[in-house]
Amino acid sequence: MEVVPLSDAIGAEIRGLDLTQPLDEGTVVAVRQAWNDHIVLVFRDQDLDLESHNRFAEYFGEVGKHMRPKSIRNESAELGPNVMLVSNIRENGKPIGSLPDGEMMFHSDTPYRENPDKYTTLYAMEIPSTGGNTIFGNCYLAAETLSEDVKQKLAGRKAVHVFEYGAVTKSGKFDRDNGRWWAQPVFRKHPETGRTALYVSELMTEEIEGLPEDESREILELLFEHQSQQKFLHEHVWRPGDLVIWDNRCSIHARTDFPETERRKLRRLTIVDENPVMMGEPPGLEVAAQ
Ligand SMILES: [Fe+2]
């Protein structure tokens, strides 16, 4: 197995593995190490049926269940509760999967739950001729490079992450009584690497708890701009047969637009976090204060 970095900031391609075959223990350890080092891993030219995809995912923990309305009776539902199809394909006018169309802002997966999924694995089956790329951002680097002022201000604070990001009141604030949300540490400690990541995102994060509304909005805008700087990013251009896996505890991702007339279909499995979310220290702050 060979680990080939894809950018200075984030991502590596893993070469030399055929994921239709079981992996030995040493290889799983090496993949886990590469994952901790690079946050996002890309395996190209894989021929993964659901069984192989599932076996790979289970090396890294328990596969998460995906909530979907009982009324949905389509290809996605037939695959069982662990699978989310990410697809714009429609049958009888209804999408067969989730998150169907167009661009998506930066986010991590499921931060609005008390126990967000630690990993996401996404396997490409059908990919449009252009666009629909996934841009990944390194949230350790984002945390480390914040100004001392901002680190001080946000130390020990939590931010509110909302699932129904469209579900806001007329005032523009999210509705705490309706919808799913959870307050998570702004600085999150990664249990395996011990490093601290900035754990907010433009799509999901609505406010910093304990700050006046204006100040909260202002500082969030600053964080969103900061974390999406090119120097922290890598853009993945999908090919059918790609398996891309990422760590939601220390990264964000966004999707670029793609033509609605073309088909896009990927199979997603997530991995449950066996650890609770941990508050982290703003990186570098203690040293600077001494
Ligand atoms: Fe996502």
Image (cartoon, rainbow, N blue to C red):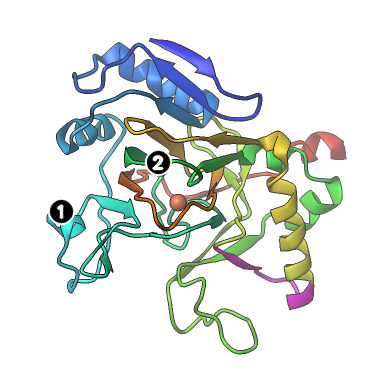
The residue lying at 61 percent from left, 63 percent from top is: 159
The residue lying at 53 percent from left, 28 percent from top is: 11
Is 279 left or right of 217, judged from the image as shown? left
The residue lying at 29 percent from left, 25 percent from top is: 46
Residue type at tag 1:
Gly
Instruction: Give the x, y percent position of residue 237.
Output: 50, 35
Residue 80's tag is 1
Specify whether residue 88 is in view: yes
Q: Secondary structure at mark 2?
A: strand
Residue type at tag 2:
Tyr
Query: Which residue is under mark 2?
Result: 119
Residue 102's tag is none
- Taking the magenta stretch, the answer to whether it contains residue 63 is no
Magenta-highlighted residues: 204-214
Q: From mark 2 to mark 1, how far is it between C-alphas?
A: 19 Å
Is 24 left or right of 283, judged from the image as shown? left
The residue lying at 57 percent from left, 36 percent from top is: 235
Considering only order in the chain, which callout, 1 or 2, is on the residue closer to the N terminus?
Answer: 1
Q: Name the foreground residue: 265 vs 280.
A: 265
Q: Is residue 113 above or below residue 122?
A: below
Q: Name the foreground residue: 216 vs 252.
A: 252
Quadrant of the drawing holding the N terminus:
top left
Which residue ends up furthest to the bottom in the rendered image?
170
Task: Classify mark 2: residues with Cα within 10 Å, few (<14), some (14-19) or many (20+).
Answer: many
Task: Classify mark 1: residues with Cα within 10 Å, few (<14), some (14-19) or many (20+).
Answer: few
Quadrant of the drawing holding the C terminus:
top right
Q: Quadrant of residue 157?
A: bottom right
Q: Secondary structure at mark 1?
A: loop
Q: Is residue 194 above or below residue 126?
A: above
